[in-house]
Amino acid sequence: MQNNSLAKQVIIGLGSNQNSLINLRRVLLEIRRQSNFKILKVSRIYESTAQLPDGAPLDWDHDYLNAAVLVEVKNFDPLALLRQLKVIETHIGRGKSEKWAPRIIDLDILYIKNFSFQSESLQIPHSLLAERPFAFLPALEVQPDMTLIKKNNLQAFNTKISDRFFWTEFVGILNVTPDSFSDGGKYTERDQFLEQARKLIHDGADYLDIGAESTRPGAAALSPTEEFLRLSPAFCYLEELKKEGLQFKVSIDSRYEQTIRQVAQNYKIDLINDVSGLSNDKMLDIIKEYNLSAVCMHSLSVPADKDIVLKSDCDPVEEISKWWTLREKAFSDFGINPDHIYFDPGFGFGKTTEQSRYLINHLEAFSPIQHKFFLGYSRKSFLGDVADKDLATAQITQNINPAFCQLVRVHNIEIQKKILSTSNAV
């Protein structure tokens, strides 16, 4: 009899062909939130055609998205893990359905190295793993030394790595500032703004993040009035893009509740990106009133001041986690839906170069934080004195565990998506 009380590394298969990308993202976040799970590696998303029995209804024929997650499970027990996954499926919205019918979400225990188990309800390794490339290939990606007796046609079901679907949503940076560190002055005029906005959307931006105040070290602070005067034309330009039929969500990069209220009264926005950590309670009022999502970023000064940083002998994860605990209480006291708040550790704001690098390499240490993560590291100085900041940004992107990155804010989306579709190739 095997001892199941120890932690084991388990490959869990994820699949969906109903509202697929949204449900895969939801279930990955839900898996991260389980206290007895530690997500070690996540595969890319794969596309495949549906498995269908003869005579299946036409509306069952929807392509699947699949992935695999390597999870360390504490106090492992195979049947208890199966029950836990069924609870997650139910939480995501899966109900009873016919065999082969479309699935909101499907979670399977696929493989555990040097471990086998068989009962009436569960078999490990999964009995059909080697015959299903949409499960086998993602599993192989998260555990390359996985061994099975046989490997059948790995091209079956038109299985392929997706170049359209990614775990992370992308926030394209579009500043209308004369003095931002990377793109100041480039997009303040209508034609240049529209050209860049179209490019970001074409390259795959889910959001356009519009900012009018530079927060780089040494930048001059704006008043809310000055900020709105800069932003107002930009939001008019966005309305032009919507009339062209372009699909995107809108984020406003501002720390002033007066500015955001003016914008929200006149334009449709989806996300508030507040580098001051939602420290003004009036900002929380706006979130509730307009049913918005918001990014809460850790910072010690805005604009950033290189002389105001966390203590050199502190653990930056511990310090930021303490701060977040206080912010969580404020959100709860205001009755803010937790799913509407994104956690941003604030790379470069109140941190030394070494502290920012430490944080980017230890995001998993923030596991107790159950909110979605928003990461903004694009072209920042802590990446080093390199000639190609977009390439340095991409090297960060490809190494981030997707479970800890629901939104990423970048300048060059094309390069970031390209690196995600080619990294960790099987």
Image (spheres, rainbow, N blue to C red):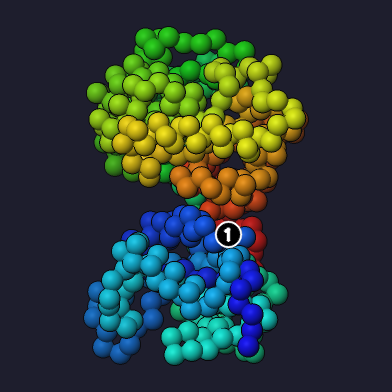
Relative to 52, is 149 on the left or the right? right
Where is the C terminus found, in terms of image quarters?
bottom right
Crowd around label 1: few <14 · some 14–19 · many ≥20 (10 Å):
many
Image vertical order of residue 258 relative to residue 199, above or below: above
Residue at 70%, 39% in the rendered image: 358
Residue at 59%, 65% in the rendered image: 74
Relative to 301, is 120 on the left or the right? left
Image vertical order of residue 254 relative to residue 208, above or below: above
Say which of 282 and 264 sits in front: 282
User: Which image quadrant for residue 117?
Assistant: bottom right
Circle 1 SS class: strand
Residue 389 visible within the image: no
Say which of 42 and 335 sits in front: 335
Q: Position of residue 354 (x, y in %)?
A: 74, 33
> Count the marks: how many?
1
Q: Position of residue 309 (x, y in %)?
A: 66, 22
Q: Position of residue 161 (x, y in %)?
A: 53, 66
Image vertical order of residue 185 relative to residue 41, above or below: above
Task: Report which residue position mark 1 lands on.
Answer: 39
Q: Position of residue 222 (x, y in %)?
A: 46, 10
The three-letter amino acid code for the residue at tag 1 is Ile
Residue at 35%, 33% in the rendered image: 333
